[in-house]
Amino acid sequence: MSTATTTDQQSPELHAADRHDLIRVHGARENNLKDISVELPKRRLTVFTGVSGSGKSSLVFSTIAAESQRMINETYSAFVQGFMPTLARPDVDVLDGLTTAIIVDQERMGANPRSTVGTATDANAMLRILFSRVGKPYIGSPQAFSFNVASVSGAGAITVEKAGRTVKERRAFSVTGGMCPRCEGMGKVSDFDLTALYDDGKSLNEGALTIPGYSMDGWYGRIFRGCGFFDPDKPIAKFTKKQLNDLLYKEPTKVKVEGVNVTYEGLIPKIQKSFLSKDREAMQPHIRAFVDRAITFQTCPDCEGTRLSEEARSSKIDGVSIADACAMQISDLAEWVRGLDAPSAAPLLKSLGETLDSFVEIGLGYLSLDRPAGTLSGGEAQRTKLIRHLGSSLTDVTYVFDEPTIGLHPHDIARMNDLLLQLRDKGNTVLVVEHKPEAIAIADHVVDLGPRAGTEGGEVVFEGTVDELRSSGTLTGKHLDDRASVKPSVRKSSGALEVRGAGTHNLRDVDVDIPLGVLVVVTGVAGSGKSSLIGGSVAKRDGVVSIDQGAIKGSRRSNPATYTGLLDPIRKAFAKVNGVKPGLFSANSEGACPNCNGAGVVYSDLAMMAGVSTPCEVCEGKRFQAEVLDYKFGGKDISEVLTMSVAQAEEFFGSGDAKLPAAHKILARLADVGLGYVKIGQPLTTLSGGERQRLKLATHMGEKGDVYVLDEPTTGLHLADVENLLGLLDRLVDSGKSVIVIEHHQAVMAHADWIIDLGPGAGHDGGRIVFEGTPADLVADRSTLTGKHLAEYVGA
């Protein structure tokens, strides 16, 4: 008895397996990280803060999450690894205590026009099974309800080996799909304006074609000249009916041109394959402008935009077809699913109901399953990806979030915080990169990176609790309790932009006068109709420069100098001073080092193992031929200019021998948006999300227009950077421009001259204007959700 008592009184020794409760990172050097070391508690919520470009994503995504994914990939056979993306080991000395990482990032959902909210979350797959089992009349398997599967049938003789003899048998097959045959499951049909494709007064050889990339100097021109279907010297207006048909509509046909076998195809099928297979938002600007000019899209008259065939729409459950179900607001669809009585599909109904309830829980109940995935904002896309993890039974997983509060109204941030805590409380490690004080407040542990951005960042300046962060003296600590105050006086408008009867998406015949010559903030909960109002009724007007949330795409060959057009005046200046061609000063053209083709590094592909990149031995990473570097401008060669930061280049091109007003103007805009530290030749792939957002802003600021529309410009910005942004918006307004900002950040709302608040809720509970007036009036009024949160924020 006494022995037992003694044993009971002793504290049980910690089991060896329970000692691994830290993720240890030592000597991390990815991108701008300066050999840093951190220890992160497992099964806790850790928030990473710091100015945009300080190294948060380099530590969380490029080091911790990347190594976790690489090690999981290594558990597969070499054969399987050959089909997977190959990941190099991050530049870090020790990574210990990692668990499986699930990344929920801000990347927009694929720009595939066939992708919808339903197909991206598996909700459509479950609905298709439900209708194939329970729908009346029965029309076929789940693929009979899929708008991505076409109905096909065929018959013919096949040869079969039987008992050593070859026998011919007749076989027939048919596949019943749900695709609308008229629009091929796109929901829209396109109509071409032929006058935008060619000038019929000219011949092909005279340059009649006005389609981007279709010049008579290239390979297309040789095919048109040599195909023999029409005379390339005859004006198109004088073509016979057959010749015009061959030019526009001819199906792919093999022809011989200059002794080479090639395929000739009419202009319209060619344009449909090359341009229209992409989502409009994913197109390059000049292609998008051509498509907008030459092609009109209208709802398919056969399927009425549902994408589904008549047969797929004929099968119903309680009078509701699958097209009706997908068009419902998800919160209403969840109610409908709960009310179904189908014992034969009970497990399916339970699973579908849980998925739809997750949408509502996460604040996306206002979407519908037929909403194209490419139209979701960054925040909506991120929350949609989170859906599949909410009901997961997995524990001891590391969830990695990239600014989950993007696109969220302060009212919705509390809901997102609850979800993050829910994931943590199931026994998971949650790592969050975040700027919003409301989201930082719930952290168990905070890692602050800095002190500044780019080469001046990459260090851990603070580790500890939120309360300790407040008194730490770091940039984040100082700004954490910053609260903007409402402007004592506001600017007077110089006119108004009238919007009448706006009915895009969920808007309810909205009439509003948007003041001009002032800073206008359009706000409201996520899904209330802000983007529908501005994107549908304002952004496409003449003289309006619209800067959306779309991420800028760029390869490792693109850099701020090429993206902003800065390199053009610089190349011309180098060429003029030295009496040579501008192409010599492009690393993607004639001046490129022949060994590395202007990349500066040589890549070796090692199949299923991570490829190796080594600096080019010939140009020593400078990317140019040696003779090109002999040409100087203002005492510098082109590679030295490209290694300058924006601030250095602004000074260099601002005065003296190298004075170049065209380049200085672009550099001044880059410095204006707070990118003075970024090197002008730095690959775009190394820029953070916030840096890319500001680069895009600087580029668009150069466009001619009187009204600027900005969609959530605070995305990816640290609290300290928001002040700089407000200064920039003020300078724009003071220079005579009108600025309309779609925003949830209370500091931007408080700084506005006029606020338009939409709501009161999301989806069909929104779409109305619930307040118009000054920020002070909104705070005093407090009748809307925005008013309550803004009053709380400014301490009124």
Image (cartoon, rainbow, N blue to C red):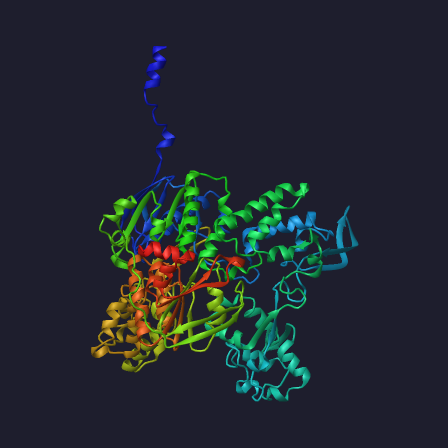
Q: Is residue 461 above or below residue 184?
A: above
Residue 482 visible here: yes
Is 371 above or below relative to 420? below
Please state if 109 lies on the left or on the right of 750 as rendered. right
Q: Nearer the viewer, residue 457 or 66?
A: 457
Position in image of residue 551 (x %, y %): 42, 63
Q: Quadrant of the N terminus?
A: top left
The image position of residue 777, as x and y in percent, is: 36, 63
Determine which quarter of the picture holds residue 243.
bottom right
Q: Report the front residue among 224 and 768.
A: 768
| Residue 419 appears left or right of 468 | right
Quadrant of the image occupied by residue 755:
bottom left
Q: Is residue 249 left or right of residue 567?
A: right
Task: Give coordinates of residue 600: x percent, y percent.
Answer: 34, 64
Work out whether residue 501 or residue 444 is closer to the camera in this orientation and state it. Answer: 501
Nearest to the observer: residue 553 or residue 502 = 502
Q: Name the outermost residue toward the left.
A: 656
As drawn, the residue found furthest toward the front would be 781
Residue drawn at x 26%, y 69% is 640
Location of the C terminus (image quadrant): bottom left
How many marks the image carries: the answer is 0
Residue 148 placement (x, y as % from top left): 62, 58
